[in-house]
Amino acid sequence: MPGMTGPATARPAEDALLGRPRQAAFITAGVLALTAVVFALVADHGMLARIQRLDDAWLRLMVSGRTPPLTAIAKVFNVLGLVYVTLPARIALAGFLALRRRWWHLAAFTAAVVLSEVLIGSLKGIYDRTRPPGALVATSGASFPSGHAIAASVTAVAAVIALVPPGRRRALWGAAAVAFSIVMGLSRAYLAAHWLSDATAGILLGASCALVTALIADQLQRWRNRGPRPARPRRPAGVPPPRRAGSSR
């Protein structure tokens, strides 16, 4: 009737985080395995000596190829990775997801960021690697892994998962996020703020955090959406069970 409000419409269910969970699990396992290999190699003193030779050669290449335009671009990326930029961006994205009531997407994004921040400090303390000499920007703390690379990778990859629906568009945006993370890592090595292996480990670790938390949140979301199994109706007392077809006495 006019002037009367109808029944409240149910809010549509939140879209699943991952379109193909099995495929996402394989990708996550591959990235995790590669991340573990890199960290294990750097932890081994014999392998670290070989890695250091590669890092030294890469640093010499970066120093010999420096130009004012490239240095200016690298310093822009240095600013983009600072907490004064990443923190407001993360808060804004989390607020947007909360306003849209995309709670599972918000949980995956927030968990990825928190996990990465916890790992940055603890891993730097464990490895305690010395930074390269002659950095073009201010640095502090240990070198391995690169905090800028981790922050760029986890924020970009987790943001794509949280904001872009599964499908071709997410794949394209995901490729852009990986490219941004790689450029951030290369800029750290160019500025001599980190060794190349520091940046590589940071990119992989950030992506791992984003993928793992998304996979876990997706599985929890699917389990929650399934809900409890309906209870079987109880047969009244004295009523015999129905006979199966084809049964005989």
Image (spheres, rainbow, N blue to C red):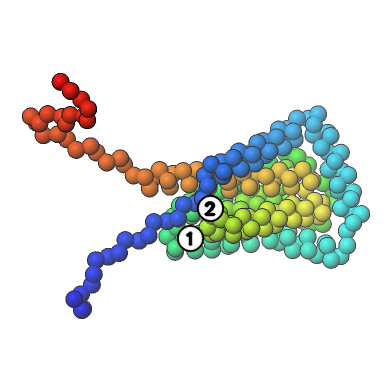
Residue 93 spot, x, y in % from top left: 54, 61
Residue 108 left/right relative to 101: right
Q: Earlier in the sequence, mark 1 or mark 2?
A: 1
Q: Residues within 10 Å of mark 1 (few under 14, many from 20)?
A: some
Q: Residues within 10 Å of mark 2 (few under 14, many from 20)?
A: many
Residue 126 seen in render = no
Quarter of the picture holding the C terminus: top left
Give the SS element for disc 1.
helix
Q: Residue furthest bottom?
A: 2
Q: Are marks 1 and 2 in contact (CB under 8 Å)?
A: yes
Residue 70 seen in render = yes
Instruction: Specify the amino acid type for callout 2.
Output: Phe
Q: Residue at x 69, y 51 (%)?
A: 149
Residue toward you, 42 or 160: 160
Kindly indicate the quadrant of the structure image that contains residue 33: top right
Quarter of the picture holding the N terminus: bottom left
Residue 121 left/right relative to 96: right
Q: Residue furthest left?
A: 238
Q: Residue at x 82, y 46 (%)?
A: 132
Decide: is 243 above or below 228: above
Residue 63 spot, x, y in % from top left: 89, 53
Give the SS element for disc 2.
helix
Residue 23 left/right relative to 247: right
Instruction: Specify the amino acid type for callout 1.
Output: Leu
Q: Residue at x 56, y 44 (%)?
A: 24
- Give the residue number, with chain letter if any, for mark 1: 97
Residue 231 left/right relative to 54: left
Decide: is 67 above or below 215: below
Residue 216 spot, x, y in % from top left: 50, 43
Residue 109, numbered circle: 2
